[in-house]
Image (cartoon, rainbow, N blue to C red):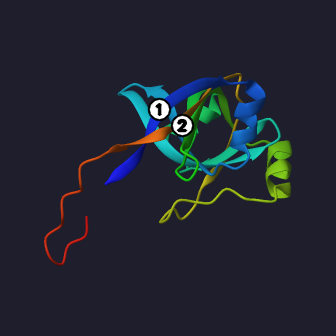
Amino acid sequence: MIAPRRTPSSRYLTVAECVDRLFGASVGRVAFNTPLGLQVLPVSIRASGTSLMLDTTPHSSLSQLAEMGGEVTLEVDETLADSGQAWSVLMRGPIVKLDAQGRQRREAMSHQVEAWPGVACAEALEFTPRSYTGRLLQHRVLGKATPTPDRPRAAPGLTP
């Protein structure tokens, strides 16, 4: 089998490019310190102006941190297989429980935060990034193809 040769490249994203990518995102990971050590949780998110809205379980460690306006790191990424691109945006900033204005902004959003399966009730939080770091990774196809080994064949009835 002959596959095109690919070479990876990367570049930093500007703050505007980071923010642009967040408007299509729906899932991220939030990281914060607890007395038991670093905790990293998957979260559903939606961009709203300069903030990200997310949900958590009431009385969870993330909820308690939001009561104090604690600092978190939030990471969002996506892989675009068709184009050979992937991007990652890492942000730092405070997370808080929604106040009345925040609840109004959230209700006015065209796309709502989707709850995780099995979560009966959720507490709405708002994350406001103070800093952004982003990278764009791309695999560029080079002109000349190179041979690659054939994939091993699966046993009958199995798919690789």
Q: Check contact, mark 1 vs mark 2: CB within 8 A.
A: yes
The answer to which image quadrant residue 125 occupies is top right
Please indicate whether residue 64 sits to the left or right of residue 126 in the image: left
Amino acid at pointer 2: Arg
| Residue type at the position of mark 1 | Thr
Q: Position of residue 63 (x, y in %)?
A: 57, 40
Instruction: Name the residue that disc number 1 marks.
Output: 7
Mark 1: give few (<14), some (14-19) or many (20+) Cα within 10 Å: few
Seen from the viewer's position, the closer of residues 110 and 97 is 110
Which dot marks residue 63? none
Placement of the N terminus among the 4 image quadrants: bottom left
Element type at mark 2: strand
Mark 2 — residue?
Answer: 140
Q: Residue at x 39, y 49 (%)?
A: 3
Q: Position of residue 48 (x, y in %)?
A: 79, 45
Residue farthest left in this picture: 155
Q: Position of residue 82 (x, y in %)?
A: 56, 53
Q: Residue at x 73, y 24 (%)?
A: 14
- As drawn, is 31 to the left or to the right of 44? left
